[in-house]
Image (cartoon, rainbow, N blue to C red):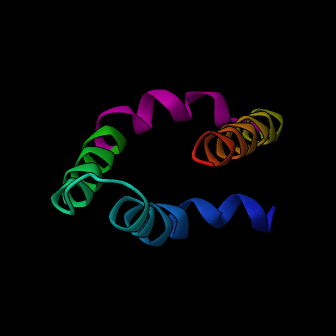
Amino acid sequence: MFALELYCPLLTVGLPSWIVTATDAPALLVSGLLILDTVLVLLFRVAVSKGARTPAGAARMLRGAGWALGASCLVSR
């Protein structure tokens, strides 16, 4: 379960470091991505969390989040 909490350090440290050091993208892109993330969370958090009303639903969503985190880490390699 601890590994699933890596999304925050990945978003706030890993992604910006990768963008600045490993790509030719401008550093200003980091700000835009963090703003986009904030807006998407505000827009979709209620709709996405509807499946977590029961412990079984929450566990299912946590597993899905784990798979999504793993896939995003593999894609960025």
Pick the front one: 19 or 60: 19
Q: Which residue is located at x 75 percent, y 38 percent?
A: 67
Is residue 45 in the magenta section?
yes
Is residue 37 in the magenta section?
no
Pick the front one: 36 or 17: 17
Q: Which SS type dominates the magenta stretch? A: helix
- Residue 4 location (% of width, % of height): 71, 58
Q: Is residue 26 left or right of residue 24?
A: left
State which quadrant residue 1 falls in. bottom right
Pick the front one: 76 or 38: 76
State which quadrant residue 3 falls in. bottom right
27 in relation to 76, above or below: below
State which quadrant residue 42 falls in. top left
- Residue 23 location (% of width, % of height): 37, 54
Q: Which residue is located at x 75 percent, y 32 percent?
A: 57
Q: How many marks?
A: 0
Q: Is residue 49 left or right of residue 24?
A: right
52 in relation to 30, above or below: above
Q: Is residue 24 left or right of residue 53?
A: left
Q: Which residue is located at x 51 percent, y 30 percent?
A: 48
- Residue 37 location (% of width, % of height): 33, 47
**Range of the magenta residues?**
42-54
- Residue 17 location (% of width, % of height): 42, 70
Q: Which residue is located at x 29 percent, y 53 percent?
A: 24
